[in-house]
Amino acid sequence: MARKPMMAGNWKMNNTVGEAVVLTQEISNQYEKEWPESVEIVICPPYVDLKPAKTVLDFDKTKIAVGAQNVYWESKGAYTGEISVPMIKEIGCACSIVGHSERRELFGETNEDVNRKVKALVEGGLYAIVCVGESLAVRDEGTTDEYVTAQVRAAFAGVDASDAAGCVVAYEPIWAIGTGRTATPEQAEAVCAAIRATLAELFGGEAAEEMRVLYGGSMNPGNVEGLLAQPNIDGGLIGGASLKCESFVQLIEACL
Ligand code: PGA
């Protein structure tokens, strides 16, 4: 199992261009050339910050990638307010987050939408960070594994193994996002293992062994070690703790 851990920062709707340049520069100033040997790093700022952040990272010759937080599946046309895969690709994005629970809950994104977005990304040569995760009600019902693995199946419907292999799944229990209430390493591992088993069913064991499964939901420097020690957790999708250089760098260093 030679999966390289990933630390992905999801800035959500935070940081103006000016603030984004400052934070990206702070992270870049801490950058160590050895990092990419042990960890893949992605930051996902708001759309307007992508190009400025990418410019800072490239100027400093870092191997930190940028990704979008969302993307539309059509490549162009009369879709007011949407942003396409070719647009984020030209900026130099490596990937986009899709199906974040905030998009599903606040913006009505469905499993079908998520699937269209995954397909558009892989067809465009980018990879998807596919978010899945259950609400507290689903967890209390005891149907977490079924719920989450159904989200995984839906997200990857019609995607072939070679395209899926580059993608990442982020398990983010909704009750742990931004709440300070992290899943225990054992709880997170159990669901991440179920996700990997589903990926193996869909794409075969080899592809499933290559694919990274991240945990997200109040991951921070205090709880990262226990989570990363789990065999099926390959890194984190980080919200709050990615908005401060110090904590994001600590999370990166936890992967070294
Ligand atoms: P959090 O967010 O780390 O602030 O809980 C994670 C996420 O929503 O991706």
Image: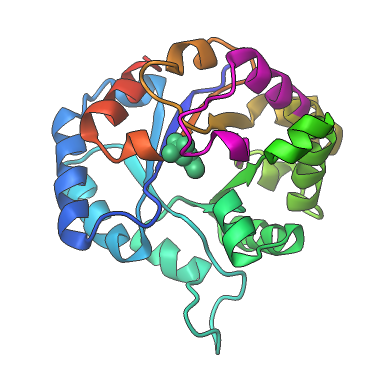
Q: Residue at x 28, y 60 (%)?
A: 49
Image position, residue 127 (x, y; %)? 56, 49
Magenta-colored stretch includes residue 172? yes
Q: In which quadrant of the rendered image does the C terminus lie?
A: top left
Q: Where's residue 179, x and y in %?
A: 48, 35
Viewer can see residue 172 = no
Residue 158 painted magenta? no
Q: Residue furthest bottom?
A: 78
Residue 43: percent from left, percent from top: 36, 44
The residue depicted at 58 percent of the width and 61 percent of the height is 106
- Magenta part of the protein: which range? 168-194
In which quadrant of the rendered view does residue 50 lie?
Answer: bottom left
Q: Residue at x 55, y 54 (%)?
A: 102
Residue 256 seen anywhere in this rendered image of the structure: yes
Image height check: is 50 above or below 77?
A: above
The image shows residue 38 at horizontal and vertical percentages of 40, 19
> Is 171 above or below relative to 2?
below
Say how the picture is coloured: rainbow
Q: Nearer the viewer, residue 23 or 40?
A: 23
Residue closest to the eye, 110 or 88: 110
- In the image, residue 17 above or below residue 199: below
Q: Nearer the viewer, residue 161 or 156?
A: 156
